[in-house]
Image (spheres, coloured by chain):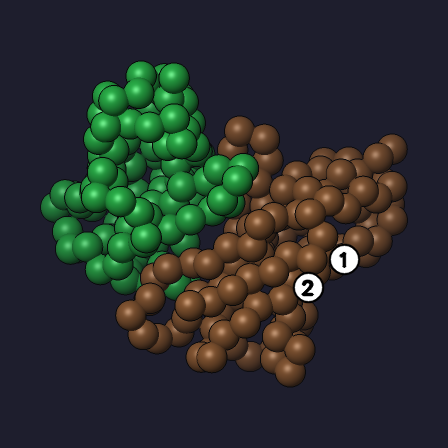
Amino acid sequence: AQSVTQLDSQVPVFEEAPVELRCNYSSSVSVYLFWYVQYPNQGLQLLLKYLSGSTLVKGINGFEAEFNKSQTSFHLRKPSVHISDTAEYFCAVSEDRGSTLGRLYFGRGTQLTVWP
Amino acid sequence: KAGVTQTPRYLIKTRGQQVTLSCSPISGHRSVSWYQQTPGQGLQFLFEYFSETQRNKGNFPGRFSGRQFSNSRSEMNVSTLELGDSALYLCASSPRGELNTEAFFGQGTRLTVV
């Protein structure tokens, strides 16, 4: 089974400051990696995903993430945050083969709060 | 194109009752999966369906069941509700049997068991 660890449960930051949300995973097989955002009383919206190719992935709303296979990490970054970025962010992994095909494994989430 | 539609959005049930939640995937999508989200356990996988067949099931008791219809719409049912079943239930769909690479989520159904 996969394991996803989001190292920070809460990240407070001031508007226009940079932010990094950390995600590490453990897996014995090749994985796909995702970041989702959830606003209050809403579902999950895909920010970006890594399937293959370039390890630097750009997503919506100015977010990007870098896949580091040796460190089994997929940290999410944004150079300048806005108050509207306040939300909960989830890192997720899935396997590219095997009996758990289709299943996403989620981290516990990081609450990003942007202060004016 | 309409997104994944889950109905109802909010539901209050009494302990011991049963409940059915509905998920209509994006038009043309054939795969559907369900997740339970609680503050204590986070996001946990319930089921995955592709072309009316359950391909995968999470570690939930038999009180949780689901099905997928020929039009790809899916329902999940929880019988003998317990207080701990209170959660946000999320449905996701994918165009093909590839929920591991592409999953679009609905707004969820908030179930409260009293």
Q: Nearer the viewer, residue A16 or B80?
A: B80
Give the image location of residue B37, x and y in percent: 46, 40
How far, Cα to Cα, is label 1 from label 2?
Answer: 7 Å
Compared across the picture, whether A29 is left or right of A48 comes to left
Label 1 sits on what residue type? Glu
With respect to residue B101, does A55 lie above or below? below
Chain A shade:
brown
Residue located 34% across and 62% down the image: A102
Tell me the chain of label 2.
A
Q: Which residue is mark 1?
A: A20
Give the image location of residue B93, x and y in percent: 34, 49
Residue located 39% across and 74% down the image: A96
Give the image location of residue A108, x and y in percent: 58, 50
Q: Quadrant of residue A21?
A: bottom right
Q: Quadrant of the C terminus of chain A?
A: top right
Q: Quadrant of residue B5?
A: top left
With respect to residue B26, does A47 lie above or below? below
Chain B shade:
green
Residue located 39% across and 63% down the image: B100
Number of dots carrying numbers: 2
With respect to residue A69, does A3 lie above or below? above
Tell me the chain of label 1.
A
With respect to residue A80, does B20 lie above or below? above
Compared across the picture, whether B55 is left or right of B8 comes to left
Q: Are marks 1 and 2 in contact (CB under 8 Å)?
A: yes
Label 2 sits on what residue type? His
Residue A25 visible (yes or no): yes
Labelled disc at residue A113:
none
Compared across the picture, whether A84 is left or right of A103 comes to right
